[in-house]
Amino acid sequence: MRVRPGDITRRALAVSSIVLAWAAAAPALERVTLRRDATEQQLAGRVLVEAQDGGLLLETPDGILWLIQPDELVRRETDQAAFEPWGAAEVAQRLLAELPPGFKVRQTANYVICYNTSDAYADWCGSLFERLYRGFHNFWKNRGWELNRPEFPLVALVFDSQASYAQYAAKDLGPATRSIIGYYHLQTNRVTTYDLTGADGLRKQQRGVSSAAHINQILSQPAAERTVATLVHEATHQLAYNSGLQTRLAGHPMWVSEGLAVYFETPDLDSARGWRSIGAVNRVHLQRFRSLLARRPATALATLLTDDARFRDPTAAPDAYAEAWALNYFLLQARREQYVQYLQAGATLPPLAQRDRDQKLADFRRAFGEDLARLDEDFLRYMQRVR
Ligand SMILES: [Zn+2]
């Protein structure tokens, strides 16, 4: 996620003021009728969280999360049938019914790509996502953590133009749509983007491109690096939330969620075999991190660990992202085992669980030791040597 007004995370968590009781592990299918915007809707899914006031967090078999407020709930009953996630074919069918005419579907091993671009562009996306998927899972496996296969097919929507994308995305992004070239949505679990060869004047001609070689040629030029990095960043969020590394709508600190996405975001468009750039130094964020060192207060580390608001404030966000990248870089290079243990503990957070400032600090100290000042010294010394 990039900084944007009306961030879905904040809207979704508005319900956290209600007291939450974990639903017992309920494989049963729950049939729910709700009234929203004056119309009744029927849903069937599994209840992830049941609030004491009757509010529900329901997950439907396509992997979409529904926050149902108590006053929206008309009826609910438990079915005899078990909850069963949909496969790729069912998800694809539903997407085609939902999107405007002209969309097609490409399936890859882990993704369902719904697109109205050229077939070649959809293939380019599928191949990028699958290589990232392999790179991501191998990265953690090499650090002793075998992540889960996704329970639901990973959905990517790819629009042919900024205009058609903006029309779809407005309900999620609000007025920021123009500046955001792609995003991962926690509730729908989808990555949404458009044909990036048409973004930022990268393509010299008006017409779309239809060959894989031409797409690669356009998107591997240096001017396209940050654009493709944004797409990889968003796809990394989706992988983290679908592999057991993070839980959707749980209160993972932003320095973890965003720092990891930034750590993985460098594109690798040349390699057919592996994603060689994972863990490479992110020049943009390193430079910014260096430039903020002169005015970095002694409390900077504790602030980064606990203050998520900086990531959503457009003026503070660039520094927060750079610091989050740097801390993830340091921990993954120099405190690898402790960081994996820290992340594994965080992976058990249930949806809608919040961690306050003190809990976040306690979680961090449990993994890395009591002495934050000492760790901060090590961190800064390490980052000075990074080239
Ligand atoms: Zn992000």
Image (spheres, rainbow, N blue to C red):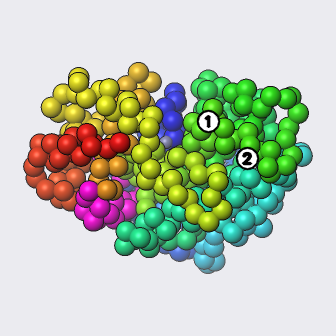
Mark 1: which secondary structure? helix
Q: Which amino acid does label 1 sit on?
A: Pro
Numbered badge on residue 222: 1
Q: Which residue occupies the foreground of this view, 6 or 37?
A: 6
Q: Is residue 42 magenta?
A: no
Looking at the image, is 264 positioned above or below residue 350? above
Q: Residues within 10 Å of mark 1 (few under 14, many from 20)?
A: few
Q: Which residue occupies the foreground of this view, 2 or 60?
A: 2
> Can you give x and y, in whole percent of width and height, for residue 19 in the image?
34, 50
- Report which quarter residue 17 is drawn in: top left
Q: What residue type is labelled 2?
A: Asn
Q: How far apart are marks 2 and 1 (CA)?
A: 12 Å
Q: Which residue occupies the foreground of this view, 34 or 204?
A: 204
Q: Residues within 10 Å of mark 2 (few under 14, many from 20)?
A: some
Numbered badge on residue 216: 2
Which quadrant holds the C terminus?
A: top left
Mark 2: which secondary structure? helix
Q: Give the range drawn in magenta.
A: 334-355
> Can you give x and y, in whole percent of width and height, for residue 226 in the image?
57, 36
